[in-house]
């Protein structure tokens, strides 16, 4: 009897999947692959049920002879293991990033004469609704909120992109690249105080108030599902911070990062060019502890950001603060630097990890931008935030367009290098 293989990456079985099974059984004995959690998250199908539950779900289906784990979006391992006579897949993978997976399967099958059977994708109102419900589920506060902690457990390094509007949120949500036979994308979003303020034409000095920051978060949440880390500046007064923790939790934000500064906060990248005061260890520890006491779920994270290296207070001060803030209840440590060279960041991470193997470490490689995610991960970094690159790429492009229109007294010259409205519209989901 011939063997047939199909891979599922769904938490819910609908008539489209049953149709694939029906078609597959015409060719022979059916093995179903369950895409692993690790592979699913790179494919932006973040699981809402466990890997074991998905396997059990597929095993129960009529006609399925066995279920195996497929641990990569590409089929190399499973195909070399089973050499199935047929691979069956819906025909909806011919375009976009998924085309790379199709190509991969075709090439692997060619090596030994296996065949690909493509089944017309079932796209009716019912299936559409189930797809939308699955996506919507991920956007719900209780799923979105816990996803950052899940990612830290599942990924060698969690990659975070800045977002300050619905549109930039969509870029963080939907940008996928195919590189060396694997798909990649961002895991989460950073609502930066710098970029949120800049988008409003305001300085980054805690002038844009929390109501406005929450409005930005809500705009992003409306159109995305990925988890959100808020740049909470200094956290304000501890008496106010506790209320904000509750609000953020309820909205489904995953984490707030607060920095150990006091008084008028200025952006860290100014370093010692401007007057900035660090909060005392006691004062800042009290704020963290108050926030942790106010928190109602186990999901939310309060991450303490240490400004000692920014303010030239030295490595020992940075480490002393890190251990004290973890002691006070911080769920993670962000260490910041404005040096071009990552050595002080790496030294901090190595020394911190000598004593603390588990507390997540966050870095923002804006100045030390030559270091790779992998190198950072090797020194114990868990979360890497690309904090302002989207804003910095859009700003000069918009300024140039404005100048060109002024110079030419028409838009034609600028238009030739602009994205079409159609390309922007395809990013935006319609109901
Ligand atoms: C931000 O993005 O607002 C940050 C990171 O706080 S930095 O600008 O590097 O201080
Ligand atoms: Mg900031």
Image: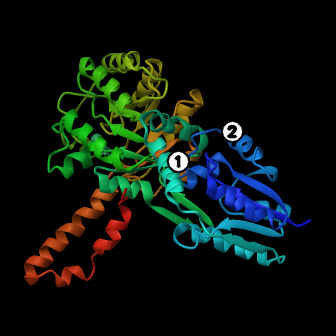
Q: Look at discs 1 and 2 and give the one toward the viewer.
A: 2
User: Nearest the camera: 313 or 223?
Assistant: 223
Name the image quarter holding residue 2.
bottom right
- Residue 233 visible at all: yes
Left or right: 207 as drawn, with respect to 219: left
User: Nearest the camera: 125 or 418?
Assistant: 125
Which residue was labeled with disc 1?
Answer: 376
Left or right: 428 as drawn, with respect to 183: left
Q: Secondary structure at mark 2?
A: helix
Instruction: Report the image quarter containing ligand 2.
Output: top left
Which residue was labeled with disc 2?
Answer: 53
Label 1 environment density (alpha carbons within 10 Å; few <14, some 14–19, many ≥20): many
* Residue 250 coordinates in the image, percent (x, y): 37, 28
Q: Secondary structure at mark 1?
A: helix
Residue at horizontal 42%, vertical 52%?
341
* Residue 324 coordinates in the image, percent (x, y): 44, 20
Residue at horizontal 57%, vertical 54%?
42
As measured in the structure, the alpha-carbon distance from the residue carrying label 1 to the one carrying label 2 is 33 Å
* Residue 155 coordinates in the image, percent (x, y): 58, 45
Q: How is the image coloured?
A: rainbow
User: Nearest the camera: 306 or 81?
Assistant: 81
Residue at horizontal 44%, vertical 29%?
300
Name the image quarter holding residue 241.
top left
Residue at horizontal 47%, vertical 51%?
132
């Amino acid at each position: 009897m011939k063997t047939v293989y199909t891979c599922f990456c769904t938490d819910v079985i609908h008539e489209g999947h049953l149709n694939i099974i029906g078609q597959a059984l015409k060719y022979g004995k059916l093995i179903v692959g369950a895409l692993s959690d690790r592979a699913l998250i790179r494919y932006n199908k973040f699981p809402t049920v466990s890997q074991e539950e998905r396997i059990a779900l597929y095993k129960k289906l009529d006609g399925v002879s066995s279920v195996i784990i497929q641990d990569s979006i590409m089929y190399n391992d499973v195909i070399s293991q089973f050499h199935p006579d047929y691979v069956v897949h819906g025909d909806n993978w011919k375009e976009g990033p998924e085309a790379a997976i199709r190509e991969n399967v075709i090439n692997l099958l060619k090596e030994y004469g296996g065949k690909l059977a493509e089944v017309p994708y079932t796209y009716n109102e019912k299936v559409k609704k189930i797809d939308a419900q699955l996506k919507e589920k991920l956007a719900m506060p209780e799923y979105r909120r816990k996803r950052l902690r899940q990612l830290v457990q599942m990924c060698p390094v969690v990659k975070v992109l800045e977002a300050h509007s619905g549109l930039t949120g969509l870029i963080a949500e939907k940008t996928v690249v195919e590189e060396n036979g694997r798909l990649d994308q961002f895991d989460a979003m950073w609502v930066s105080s710098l970029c949120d303020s800049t988008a409003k034409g305001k300085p980054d000095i805690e002038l844009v108030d929390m109501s406005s920051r929450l409005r930005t978060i809500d705009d992003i949440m409306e159109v995305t599902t990925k988890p959100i880390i808020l740049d909470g500046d200094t956290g304000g007064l501890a008496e106010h911070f506790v209320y904000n923790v509750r609000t953020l939790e309820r909205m489904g934000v995953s984490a707030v990062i607060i920095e150990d500064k006091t008084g008028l906060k200025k952006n860290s990248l100014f370093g010692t060019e401007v007057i900035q005061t660090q909060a005392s260890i006691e004062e800042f520890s009290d704020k963290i502890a108050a926030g942790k006491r106010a928190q109602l779920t186990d999901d939310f994270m309060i991450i303490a950001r240490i400004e000692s290296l920014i303010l030239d207070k030295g490595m020992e001060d940075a480490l002393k603060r890190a251990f004290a803030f973890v002691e006070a209840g911080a769920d993670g440590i962000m260490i910041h630097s404005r040096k071009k060279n990552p050595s002080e960041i790496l030294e901090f991470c190595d020394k911190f990890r000598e004593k603390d193997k588990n507390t997540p470490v966050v870095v923002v490689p804006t100045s030390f931008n030559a270091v790779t995610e992998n190198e950072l991960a090797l020194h114990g970094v868990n979360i890497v935030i690309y904090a302002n690159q989207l804003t910095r790429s859009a700003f000069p492009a918009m300024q140039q367009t404005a100048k060109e229109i002024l110079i030419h007294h028409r838009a034609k010259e600028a238009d030739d290098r602009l994205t079409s409205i159609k390309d922007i519209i395809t990013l935006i989901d319609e109901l």
